[in-house]
């Protein structure tokens, strides 16, 4: 559980991965300023998971 009381989701992949990772930002208006850092950390973790799940394109030598 995060400081904001939310349970962080597992790795998010696929076309909607980035959108899902950004979803916690919708809670900012209802979250006290003291909880904003936790929301931002949750978003950062989600975006890092999305980036980590992206496969590198094959180089010319591998094709």
Image (tube, grey):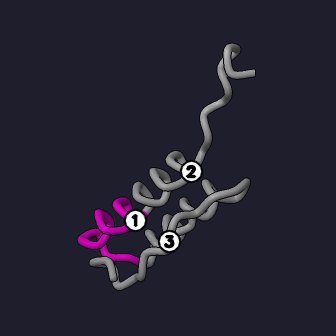
In magenta, the rendered stretch is 31-42
Q: Is 37 included in the stretch rendered in magenta?
A: yes
What residue is shown with label 2?
Answer: 53
Q: Residues within 10 Å of mark 3 (few under 14, many from 20)?
A: few
What residue is at 56 percent from the left and 50 percent from the top? 53
Name which residue lies at 57% across and 66% down. 23
Query: Predominant secondary structure in magenta?
Result: helix
Residue extending furthest toward the top: 61
Horizontal side of residue 43 vs 63, given as left or right: left
Helix, strand or loop at mark 1:
helix
Report the front residue among 19 and 54.
Answer: 54
Q: Which mark is residue 42?
A: 1
Point out which mark residue 10 bears: 3
Residue 20 point in image, percent of width and height: 61, 64
Looking at the rendered structure, the secondary structure element under dot 2 is: helix
Q: Is residue 41 above or below residue 28?
A: above
Q: Residue furthest left?
A: 34
Frontmost residue, 31 versus 20: 20
**Residue 51, image x, y percentages:** 53, 46
Which residue is rendered at x = 31% and y = 68% of the image? 38
Q: Nearer the viewer, residue 33 or 15?
A: 15
The residue carrying pointer 2 sits among few (fewer than 14), some (14 to 19) or many (20 or more) residues within 10 Å by Cα, namely some
């Amino acid at each position: 559980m995060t400081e904001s009381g939310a349970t962080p989701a597992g790795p998010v992949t696929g076309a909607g991965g980035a959108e899902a990772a950004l979803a916690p930002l919708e809670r900012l208006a209802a979250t006290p300023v003291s909880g904003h850092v936790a929301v931002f950390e949750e978003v950062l973790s989600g975006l890092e998971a999305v980036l980590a799940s992206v496969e590198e394109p094959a180089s010319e030598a591998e094709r």
